[in-house]
Image (cartoon, rainbow, N blue to C red):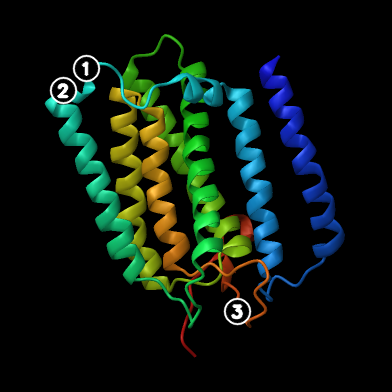
Amino acid sequence: MVVIIEIIALLAVLVPIVVLYVLRYKGHDPAVWSPPAAWSRWAIYCCLCLIFADVSGAMETTLSSPLVYPGQLQDPWWLITTCALFLFIIVAYWGYWYRNTLRFGRRLDFFPQLIFGLGWGFCTGLLFLCWWHLALWIGAGWPRWGVGLLAYFLISLWQALFMDMYWDIYVSPEHDTPQSIRQKVPRTHIPNMTFCLIWLVVYENYWLFIGLQTTALLAASFGMRMPAPWCRDNIPAPRRVPGLLGLPRAGGHIEE
């Protein structure tokens, strides 16, 4: 019953946003990057992630999970791996990703970028847990490592298609080059998902897993200087190139 009430409440928020978005931005030129349109898509994404989390059971499990399970603080391997993961996220995202990101003179706007990064990070971490729960359902009776591999496949496929062919075109402003895309994926995104998912399979710390992804995407929000929804600056739209089945994907900025 609680889940149904949560879903109804989220739909009450989602439906007006979708209606306003369709009325305001239907037929909007994708070559013109619009901050309010991007923030509308961000809000829709966050609502859908929360609904999926309710339906999959990931939300209920997360809310009922402790931050740290009994005995973990006394487990040296848990302490080492957890600290190593947070250190990796700081170095990879707040260090490497942050430095190797185009901003085109966009200014640091702390509170909008904080809100965007927190929502993006929390909902994305929760979405990954939804895929984990789907893998648990599909692989009921499988060995733990088999379920982990299925979850890794599902998350990787989702990220490869959604980030490349939607988020980095319709939500994020231009912030990469073809070279930075080729470098960031194997140096930040792939090891992040690989190490964090292995750690989740072993220890099941849902809140800390979400915290890891939120820490990473906060760096992305600040690093690319996500414009506020009321921003009226002329912001370069992401360069689109043909992707899977001829659909557009983010190609990265090329200096003319």
Report which residue position mark 3 lands on.
235
Q: Is residue 2 left or right of residue 73?
A: right
Residue at 56% over, 62% down: 112
Q: Earlier in the sequence, mark 3 or mark 2?
A: 2
Query: Can I make out residue 220 in this image?
Result: yes
Report which residue position mark 2 lands on.
75
Report which residue position mark 1 lands on.
71
Image quadrant occupied by the N terminus: top right
Q: Is residue 97 above or below residue 158?
A: below
Residue 53's spot in the image, x, y percent? 58, 29
- Hey, what amino acid is under mark 1? Gly
Find numbered disc 1 in the image and state the secondary structure of the residue it sits on. Answer: loop
The quadrant in which residue 3 appears is: top right
Residue at 66% over, 66% down: 229
Residue closest to the eye, 159 or 223: 223
Residue closest to the eye, 247 or 196: 196
Q: Are marks 1 and 2 in contact (CB under 8 Å)?
A: yes
Residue found farthest to the top: 141
